[in-house]
Amino acid sequence: MTDSAAVHVSYSRWWDVYFFAIATANAVAVLSSDQTPVLEWIAIGAIGAMIVLHATIGWREARGSDGPLSVTVLAVQVTLFVVAASVVPLASWLLFAVIPLIFQLAPTRVAIGAVVLVTMVPTAVDLVSGQGDWKHDLVISAISAAAGIWLGLWIIRVVQQSTERANLIAELEASRAEVARLSHEAGVTAERTRLAGEIHDTLAQGFTSIITLIQASDPALRDERLALAVRTAKENLAESRAIIAALSPSALASGLLDSVRRQASRFTEETGVAAGFRVTGDPRDLPTPVEVVLLRATQEALTNVRRHAHANEVAVLLAYSPASVRVVVRDDGCGFDPAGPGGFGLSGMRQRAEQVGGTLTVRSDPETGTTIELEVPS
């Protein structure tokens, strides 16, 4: 069950209690009226049928389905109310329970019409029976209809606001969890990248220098001790390179180009939305931090498309130029306001881009969709 559904169910339960209480109290009041016992029992039977109908079917339909069955239940409830109010005018106090029920069972426009109909019942009874002051009751009916419509619309708005508030709280909690996850992931990635760079700059280069110096002094490695030193240095160089590879992001194991291509393919497999991939320029190896930023930007952009864009098509471009490398993710979705506060994903991309001297550009509108471009000098 969603948070909004939970909020609606919580409100509906209280309305159920309210309906049963008003209907029961009205049935008791009918017993004390000055009508004949036959008419009293007809009214009580109608009220009892209303209670049974709501207890068995109506409460489910009042949860917001607005389908044919809801309208049918509403029609039966209104008919039973008309019967009760027609034989015992005191039963018209059921309006306090019927009007909220109408707004729960029917769309707003139908509910407004139904409220006008039920509030006119006392006036209609006066006109048909020739008893009572129909003009006085007409004024009361008009006031009751206006008050009932206002109350129903106000209740709808209150429920909507509560639902929106619950959804906002859920989104904030999800965003907070996502920020914590991304922060942890970014910290782990940064540390792994730092360690990989330090190993490359110290141990790996040191072993390479040792091998070069030994081979320069004895190219044929006739001295067994020098040969053993070279073999040992080569083995340790291989180990250090394996450690560097292990510390680098696993998604980049096959290189940036292949990794970005796989992200586009995976997006299509997971969403069913076509995601084309294109590369321009001459691909080349880049520093690991730069490749991490470009790959993470691609992943985050595709994640945003999946969650928010409702796109029919996505295009991913990896463009190499002599001075820079760009990754561009373009979709034909609903777009958003780039001048707005944005999400944590865009903030994370901007921060990562700044760490490697890159720039993030976001263009979006409802007609053309969204384009996210990250350019990093290289």
Image (cartoon, rainbow, N blue to C red):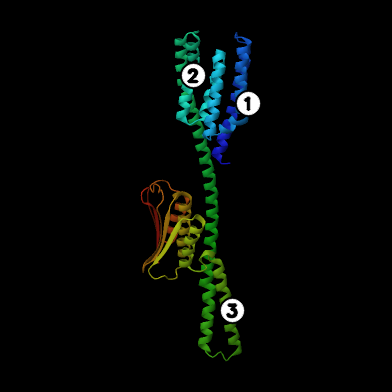
Marks 1 and 3 sit apart, C-alpha to C-alpha, by 84 Å
The picture places residue 15, in percent across and down from the top left corner, at 57, 27
Marks 1 and 2 sit apart, C-alpha to C-alpha, by 23 Å
Q: Quadrant of residue 138?
A: top left
For label 3, the SS is helix
Amino acid type at circle 2 is: Thr
Tag nearer the camera, 1 or 2:
1
Marks 3 and 2 sit apart, C-alpha to C-alpha, by 92 Å
For label 2, the SS is helix
For label 1, the SS is helix
Q: Is residue 68 above or below residue 175?
A: above
Tag nearer the camera, 3 or 2:
2
The residue carrying mark 3 is 235
Crowding near pointer 1: few (<14 within 10 Å), some, many (20+)? few
The residue carrying mark 2 is 119
Q: Earlier in the sequence, mark 3 or mark 2?
A: 2
Q: Which mark, by number, is residue 353?
A: none
Amino acid type at circle 1 is: Val
Q: Is residue 257 above or below residue 43?
A: below
Identify the image quadrant of the N terminus: top right
Depth order, front residue of 377/52: 52
The residue carrying mark 1 is 52
Q: Earlier in the sequence, mark 1 or mark 3?
A: 1
Identify the image quadrant of the C terminus: bottom left
The picture places residue 105, in percent across and down from the top left corner, at 53, 30
